[in-house]
Image (tube, rainbow, N blue to C red):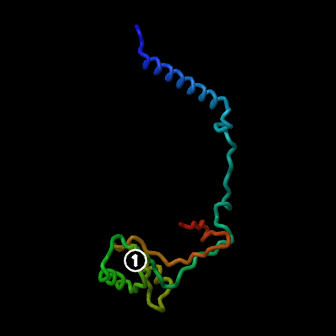
């Protein structure tokens, strides 16, 4: 039986591929791969290394200010209705998103801020509500323990 040139080339390539695969498996299993599959000693993580660094100050927030993110856009009248239900005043829209900076009336307490946030979270139109937390940038370029990345 006469084999075609294409069939012979295919057999040679297949044979070469099998040899390369076999050589690679031998290389890896014999440890020549730089010890990638060698068992490494286990390390334990202490509880102290999981805590926040001592130099990180606690988060502070702007008193009586709450950031409210909406699930869907609301008309200004509907936002006013929602915010007035909780005695909130809309201070400003944050960017072009459905995130709004709101403020409780002067003389309100921190406890009222916390309870308002809890109640806002139960509203169907509200995605989330949180205090307006201040972030400090440290000399090493981090912001509250997270790296600050500049965008172009």
Residue furthest top in the image? 1
**Residue plotted at (68% across, 42% down):** 40
Closer to the camera, 71 or 151?
Answer: 151
Q: Position of residue 143 (x, y in %)?
A: 60, 71
Q: Is residue 126 left or right of residue 110?
A: left
Q: Position of residue 21 (x, y in %)?
A: 56, 27
Instruction: Write down the quadrant of residue 28 in the picture.
Output: top right
Closer to the camera, 29 or 6?
Answer: 6
**Residue plotted at (44% across, 17% down):** 5
Instruction: Write down the quadrant of residue 4 in the picture.
Output: top left
Residue furthest bottom in the image? 107
**Residue plotted at (48% across, 92% down):** 107
Instruction: Write down the quadrant of residue 149 in the picture.
Output: bottom right
Q: Position of residue 27 (x, y in %)?
A: 64, 29
> On the image, numbered disc 1 is attached to which residue?
119
Numbered circles on residues, count: 1
Image: 32 above or below 79: above
**Residue plotted at (64% across, 61% down):** 50
Q: Residues within 10 Å of mark 1 (few under 14, many from 20)?
A: few
Q: Position of residue 132 (x, y in %)?
A: 50, 78
Q: Secondary structure at mark 1?
A: helix
Q: Is residue 101 left or right of residue 125?
A: right
Closer to the camera, 118 or 37?
Answer: 37
Closer to the camera, 81 or 30?
Answer: 30
Q: Is residue 151 left or right of residue 54?
A: left
Screen quadrant of the N terminus: top left
């Amino acid at each position: 039986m006469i084999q075609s040139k294409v069939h012979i080339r295919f057999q040679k390539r297949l044979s070469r591929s099998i040899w390369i695969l076999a050589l690679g498996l031998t290389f890896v299993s014999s440890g020549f791969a730089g010890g990638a599959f060698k068992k490494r000693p286990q390390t334990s993580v202490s509880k102290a290394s999981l805590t926040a660094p001592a130099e990180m100050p606690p988060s502070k927030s702007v008193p009586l200010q709450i950031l409210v993110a909406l699930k869907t856009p609301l008309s200004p009248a509907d936002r006013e209705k929602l915010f007035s239900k909780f005695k909130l005043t809309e201070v400003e829209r944050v960017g072009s998103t459905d995130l709004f900076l709101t403020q409780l009336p002067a003389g309100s307490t921190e406890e009222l801020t916390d309870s308002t946030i809890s109640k806002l979270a139960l509203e169907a139109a509200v995605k989330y509500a949180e205090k307006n937390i201040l972030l400090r940038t440290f000399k090493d370029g981090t912001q509250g323990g997270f790296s600050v990345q500049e965008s172009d």
